[in-house]
């Protein structure tokens, strides 16, 4: 299993009135991890879109384990947890760097669409990169 990691620092605008990361921002962190995972694998979103391949999120989930606060450094771990004919599932863990505490974990399922925005098989090139 190929696990990709990136780091990000919690910015003030990502927190709520209590100084805790607002829950919806975890889905942004998931997208950051997924985007950089694909870039590292040699298939950035920009290339896929030029090739008329689109990957909308069809389902996403996040389990919150511990609060993340302003100025925390977070490690976003991303990996492929399921690869099917026309869908791919990415899983994530977000860990606070300072104490290695699990902050959140979840997944995103994406469908592969062609230029007509119809479901289609994952391209072989992408499958081979993700396996």
Image (spheres, rainbow, N blue to C red):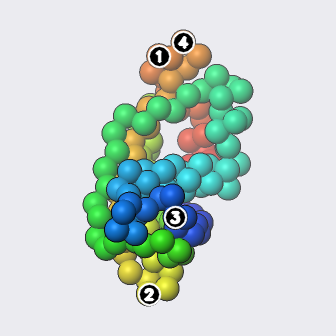
The Cα–Cα distance between marks 4 and 3, rounded to whole angstroms, is 40 Å
For the residues labelled 4 and 2, say whether their Cβ atoms are less than 8 Å apart: no
Report the residue at 58% width, 67% height from top: 8
- Which comes before the other along the chain, label 2 or label 1? 2
- Which comes before the other along the chain, label 2 or label 3? 3
Which mark lies nearer to you, 2 or 1? Answer: 2
41 or 59, which is in the foreground? 59
Residue at the extreme front: 17
Secondary structure under badge 1?
A: loop
* Whether residue 117 is situated above or below residue 17 in the rendered picture: above
- Which comes before the other along the chain, label 4 or label 3? 3
The Cα–Cα distance between marks 1 and 3, rounded to whole angstroms, is 40 Å
Report the residue at 65% width, 29% height from top: 49
The residue tagged 4 is 116
For the residues labelled 1 and 4, say whether their Cβ atoms are less than 8 Å apart: yes
The residue tagged 2 is 99
Mark 2 burial class by Cα count in 10 Å: few <14, some 14-19, many 20+: few
The Cα–Cα distance between marks 1 and 4, rounded to whole angstroms, is 5 Å
The residue tagged 3 is 12
Mark 4 burial class by Cα count in 10 Å: few <14, some 14-19, many 20+: few
Which mark lies nearer to you, 4 or 3? Answer: 3
């Amino acid at each position: 299993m190929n696990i990709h990691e990136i780091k990000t620092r919690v910015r003030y605008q990502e927190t709520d009135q209590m100084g805790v990361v607002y829950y919806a921002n975890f889905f942004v962190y998931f997208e950051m991890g997924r985007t950089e995972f694909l870039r590292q694998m040699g298939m950035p979103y920009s290339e896929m879109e030029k090739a008329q391949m689109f990957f909308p999120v069809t389902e996403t989930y996040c389990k919150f384990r511990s609060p993340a606060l302003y100025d925390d450094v977070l490690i976003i771990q991303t990996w492929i947890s399921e690869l099917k004919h026309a869908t791919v599932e990415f899983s994530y863990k977000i860990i606070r760097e300072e104490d290695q505490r699990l902050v959140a974990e979840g997944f995103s399922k994406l469908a592969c669409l062609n230029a007509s925005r119809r479901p289609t098989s994952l391209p072989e090139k992408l499958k081979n990169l993700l396996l």
